[in-house]
Image (tube, rainbow, N blue to C red):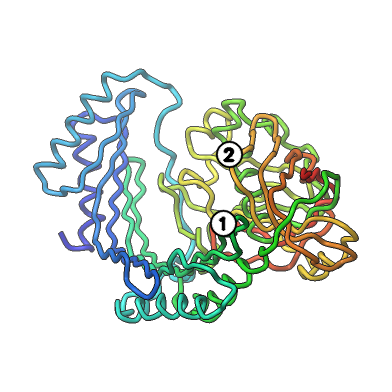
Amino acid sequence: MKNDNLLKLAEDLVSLGRKKGASQIEVSIRQGSEFSLDVREGEVERLVEAGSKGLSLRLFVEGKMARASSSDLSKETLEKLVENAIERAKLSNSDPLAGLPEKEVISVDVEKLKMWDPAILELLPEKKIAVAMEIEKICLSDKRVKKSYGSSYGTYTGETFLANSSGFSGSYKRTSCSSGVYLQSGEEPNLFDEGWNDSSRILSELESPEEIAKKAIHRVTRLIGGKKVDTQNVPVVFESPMTASLLSFLYNCINGNSIYLKQSFLAGKIGEKIGSDLVTVTDDGLIPGASGTKPFDSEGVPTRKTVVIENGVLKNYLMDTYAGKKLNLKSTGNSAGANNFYLSPGKSTPEEIIKSVDKGLFLTGTIGFGLVPTTGDISRGAYGLWIEKGELTYPVSEITFSGNLGQLLKGIEMVGNDVKFKDSITGPTIKVAEMTVGGK
């Protein structure tokens, strides 16, 4: 089957499903090519190059739903797949809210979303191996690095086709590339593992081997000699990746499923002040070249810009069609999760934020879980660098930090200017007025 026929195939299956008795049907086809490799101690440890093609469908018979999928796209297999799914749907329980979204017109110019870079297709495997080798070589040339867990390089090119019985029919292409390395430093019994990974839709925007190696070396060696601190309440500065981790927890608390299931402390709080004036959080699936950018979600609902928190006030939840019906709201185009979910940048540099702290923690990593959406409570193992009189002084480890997401959002008193859209959930460096840091 040629690529340009896959959308037609999806449309034909929708028609077949309707003829066979489905009241509604949605067909999605994904086709892609993946390359990934790991290099360790100068040798290629793993190399995978694979193509993939798969079809999944979701159909409804009088409110009763069934799903099915297949990697065999032959006519006979797919006809049987639809027939079996219809019969299976009849055996399930009816849900009056189950069904497809109404058709919405997509007005965005897909070409302007910068999701596709042909340079990634032209990149030879030898070049990818050479880059991974170079990153590890630079890292191991630093005597403070004790061990390499391996450097990596990966690329993906693929296309998504979607059609449904509400009249939606569309497709888009995307590419991505990534590279990184993971290292160990220190001496027994105080060994530290850290690294750095970068990713991009556009090859020219991927960090160079030198940049990735430099960041990985900095991150793992700055932890050498880590020690505990006394338990105390102090300001905590979240490094940018830690802010992203915090926003990931926030996303779990504001998605429609958590809200209608009453599994979030933010249920029923639309319109309430839940953060400081500096907190504006947005989901935007239309940022050109960003990691989570796409023209429509997995239900064919157009992605969009949705302000979730504006100057501290909770404005919207994010949801798919079913959660929207449960909450008597419209889908926000988030059936596949976060698109580009981020905290708006402020004006301060990370250095200015650190300088504002007389004594506190610069949080660079966490360990374990300890996140409770129903209450917003946070309690995690952590490590980072101790701040004294505005300067990073020494590494700290074997500590915990604890608090509550609601209190933390209200306690944000500085926001950095260092947002980068390399991941679908991202944020800048932030300073929280006070949290409990547990140590000795």
Residue 255, which numbered label? Answer: 2
> Among all residues in the image, which is located at the extreme left?
76
**100 over 114 or under it: above or below:** above
Looking at the picture, tell me which residue is in the foreground, 351 or 170. 351
Question: Horizontal and vertical percent for residue 316?
Answer: 66, 42
> Among all residues in the image, which is located at the extreme front?
188
**240 over 127 or under it: above or below:** above
Give the structural element (helix, strand or loop) at label 2: loop
Looking at the picture, tell me which residue is in the foreground, 221 or 330. 221
Looking at the picture, tell me which residue is in the foreground, 76 or 105. 76
Question: Horizontal and vertical percent for residue 333?
Answer: 51, 47
Give the structural element (helix, strand or loop) at label 1: loop
Q: Residue at x 59, y 73 (%)?
A: 144
Circles 1 and 2: CB atoms closer than 8 Å = no
The quadrant in which residue 349 appears is: bottom right
**151 over 160 or under it: above or below:** below
Instruction: Say which label, 1 or 2, has the lower sequence index.
Output: 2
Q: Residue at x 43, y 69 (%)?
A: 151
Q: Mark 1 — residue?
A: 340
Mark 2, Cα crowd under 10 Å, few <14 / some 14-19 / many 20+, is many
Question: Horizontal and vertical percent for residue 238?
Answer: 73, 56
Look at the image and tell me in which quarter the N terminus lies: bottom left
Mark 1, Cα crowd under 10 Å, few <14 / some 14-19 / many 20+, is many
Looking at the picture, tell me which residue is in the foreground, 222 or 16. 222
Q: Residue at x 24, y 61 (%)?
A: 51
Question: Horizontal and vertical percent for residue 231?
Answer: 82, 44
Q: Amino acid at mark 2?
A: Asn
Between the residue at mark 1 and the residue at mark 2, the CA separation in whole angstroms equals: 14 Å
